[in-house]
Image (cartoon, grey):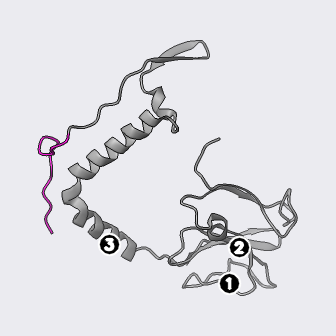
Amino acid sequence: MTTEPVSAEACNEAAPVARRIPTERTHHGDTFTDDYAWLADKNNQETVAYLEAENAYTEAVTAGQAALRDAIFGEIKARTQETDLSVPTRKGNWWYYARTMAGKQYAVHCRREVRPGDTSPPMTLDGAPLDGEEVLLDGNELAGDGEFFSLGMLAVSPDGGCWPTPPTSPAASASPCGSRT
């Protein structure tokens, strides 16, 4: 497979250039100027237009690399075990772990009670659910049909319950929209 590198000069479009709007900020007595602070406002139509122009330019300049991108992605995906199980961690009388499943975007967080004679973590070779597991949080269910989902944290109390919520659901922070606020 060959791809032809495309130089910016070979592209009929000029690279977009962001306007410089000096904005001063002072932190701990130090003042600095940020010429591109205006780009942080995702609701500003000028920001959106600039980002769309950047994306169009990148697409035009890298169009000749689409087959290579697809081939590299296919190779990485072929080498990735999509259905997998993290190494379980013991906390009290429970093994805690996460499972990923082929075709799903997010992990399923689970636990299984420690059984008599368990001296090492339970594992499966194929990443399938463990016998007797309890699903604490399914990221795929929380994400639903949204475009984005991020699980910020998942916490379990020292006694094996989940705090500050009842034992049937873990304490977790999640974002369906990707905002940092």
Residue occupying image coordinates x 20% and y 37% = 14
How far across and down, in percent of the image, does residue 81 sit?
Answer: 47, 76
- Real-space CA distance between mark 3 and mark 1, rounded to the nearest whole angstrom: 29 Å
Secondary-structure class at tag 3: helix
Give the residue pinned by disc 1.
130
Q: How crowded is mark 3: few (under 14 residues within 10 Å), some or many (20 or more)?
A: few
Magenta region: 1-13
Q: Residues within 10 Å of mark 1 (few under 14, many from 20)?
A: some
- Real-space CA distance between mark 3 and mark 2, rounded to the nearest whole angstrom: 30 Å
Tag 1: amino acid: Leu
Residue occupying image coordinates x 80% and y 66% = 169
Q: Taken as a whole, is the magenta stretch helix, strand or loop?
A: loop
- Real-space CA distance between mark 1 and mark 2, rounded to the nearest whole angstrom: 9 Å
Mark nearer the viewer, 3 or 1: 3
Residue 91 got which mark? none
How far across and down, in percent of the image, does residue 70 sit?
Answer: 29, 67
How far across and down, in percent of the image, does residue 178 sit?
Answer: 58, 50
Tag 2: amino acid: Cys
> Tags 3 and 2 in contact by the CB under 8 Å rule?
no
Secondary-structure class at tag 2: strand
Q: Which of 131 and 142 is in front in this view?
A: 142
Residue 75 got which mark? 3
How far across and down, in percent of the image, does residue 104 sit?
Answer: 54, 73
Give the residue pinned by disc 2.
110
| Placement of 47 over or under 146, stated as above or below | above
Classify residue 166 by image quadrant.
bottom right
> Tags 1 and 2 in contact by the CB under 8 Å rule?
yes
